[in-house]
Amino acid sequence: MPSVSIKPSSTRVDPAADLPLPAMEHTGSAPEKLALVIPTLCEAENIGGLLRDVRTVLDPLNVPYEILVVDDDSPDGTGAAVSAIALEDPRVRLLVRKGERGLSGAVLHGWENTDAAILGVMDADLQHPPELLPQLLSAIREGADIAIGSRYTPGGDLSQWNPVRKLLSAVAVWATWPIQRPGVRARDPMTGFFLV
């Protein structure tokens, strides 16, 4: 299974910056649509800036996309913030799950509600840099089955994590090794930032 390592970054997106973008292969037919699922629970403070940053990064790529914010019925106004943005940009959609909780269920719910051929996930807590999306998308379009944004690849940055979080993350990664197929091991199987 082809895979790719993407050098992560912790730099915030500057909407006015000139972003170096990977060349997107055009075959004469319309590019495949990307659906990016962003699961949320009480992310009202982050979601507006994140949606702005993601759109700023994806717009110059000229690829059809939609951003599906799957909210687990947040009481903090996350849904209202996303709804306001969705009124201005129909590529942003809000899906609210009532009485359900959980990251994996939210991701699957988003994927079940799109017609896109390329599926992705990123967290809403600003840990995943949107400026890596063009590289992840390019890797998928070049034939990779999965493209993962990870802090564990060369150039990754764990410096802002406290020692307990680093230890818990290392234990979680180590615990997955027995269930991963030899020769197809992910260095960061716990990541929430990837495209397939």
Image (cartoon, rainbow, N blue to C red):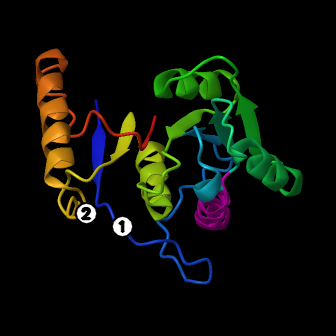
Question: How dense is the environment of label 1, judged by Cα within 10 Å: few (below 14), some, or many (20 and up)?
Answer: some
Residue 87 shown left or right of residue 79 in the figure? right
Q: Please name the residue that numbered disc 1 is placed on.
A: 10
Q: Which residue is mark 2?
A: 160
Nearer the observer: mark 2 or 1; the answer is 2
Between disc 2 and disc 1, whose residue precedes? 1
Residue 109 placement (x, y as % from top left): 62, 22
Q: Residue at x 87, y 57 (%)?
A: 88
- Using residue 150 as the reference point, say whether residue 142 is left or right of it: right
Secondary element type, mark 2? loop
Identified by mark 2, the residue type is Gln
Q: Position of residue 104 (x, y in %)?
A: 47, 24
Does the CB distance between marks 2 and 1 fall below 8 Å?
yes
Task: State the mark number for residue 47.
Answer: none
* Magenta-highlighted residues: 48-63
Relative horizontal placement of residue 165, taking residue 131 as reference (left or right): left
How many numbered discs, if any? 2
Name which residue lies at 23% across and 60% down: 156
The amino acid marked with disc number 1 is Ser
Task: Residue at 20%, 55% (x, y): give it.
Answer: 162
**Element class at badge 1:** loop
Depth check: give the residue in front, 128 or 58: 128
Q: In the rendered image of this protein, does residue 142 appear above or below residue 175?
A: below
